[in-house]
Amino acid sequence: VQLQASGGGLVQAGGSLRLSCAASGRTFSNYDMGWFRQAPGKEREFVAAISWSLSRTYYADSVKGRFTISRDNAKRTVFLQMNSLKPEDTAIYYCARRASMLTTSPTGDPNEYDYWGQGTLVTVSS
């Protein structure tokens, strides 16, 4: 399985970006997907997750109401729409695939994810 994240860039505070993560592998639709981020000098943190069935999403409190996670199983792609961006959103954003398939609800625990993309840098200027 390979995950290729894209869509990062430089944006002013209040602006928007849409991240994409394209996955290889024919069983993409059976797995929850998540987005995590790591800012300079900080630990990796959970951002958002979406269930394999598209019916459930889960967000970190810091992004709730501003970010939206979605997926297109036919295209094996997961998205992160980021609106009202703040300087504190600056980080490398990683997409990840959950290790277990067909789970009951998404999780923000990074230990539950086994495949990770290479990351895409988001920089929000003030």
Image (spheres, rainbow, N blue to C red):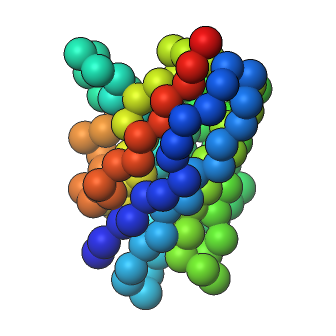
- Residue 62 visible in the shown view: no
Q: Which residue is drawn at 38% across and 37% down?
A: 92
Picture coordinates of residue 115, whole percent (x, y): 27, 59
Based on the displayed image, in which of its 4 quarters is residue 99 positioned?
bottom left
Q: In this view, does 30 lie above or below 82?
A: below
Total labels: the figure holds 0
Q: Position of residue 111 (x, y in %)?
A: 25, 40
Q: Is residue 42 left or right of residue 56?
A: left
Residue located 32% across and 57% down the image? 117
| Quadrant assignment for the N terminus | bottom left
- Report whether 101 appears left or right of 55: left
Q: Residue at x 55, y 59 (%)?
A: 20
The residue depicted at 56 percent of the width and 24 percent of the height is 124
Locate residue 35, reporting x and y percent: 47, 44
Up-down relation of residue 124 to residue 120 (above or below): above
Decide which of 22, 40 is in the foreground and name it.
40
As rendered, which of 31 and 103 lies closer to the eye?
31
Indicate the quadrant containing the C terminus: top left, top right, bottom left or bottom right. top right
Residue sitting at the far bottom = 26
Seen in the picture, residue 1 relative to 32 is either above or below; the reply is below
- Residue 11 in sight from this viewpoint: yes
Residue 4 horizontal side relative to residue 18, left or right: left
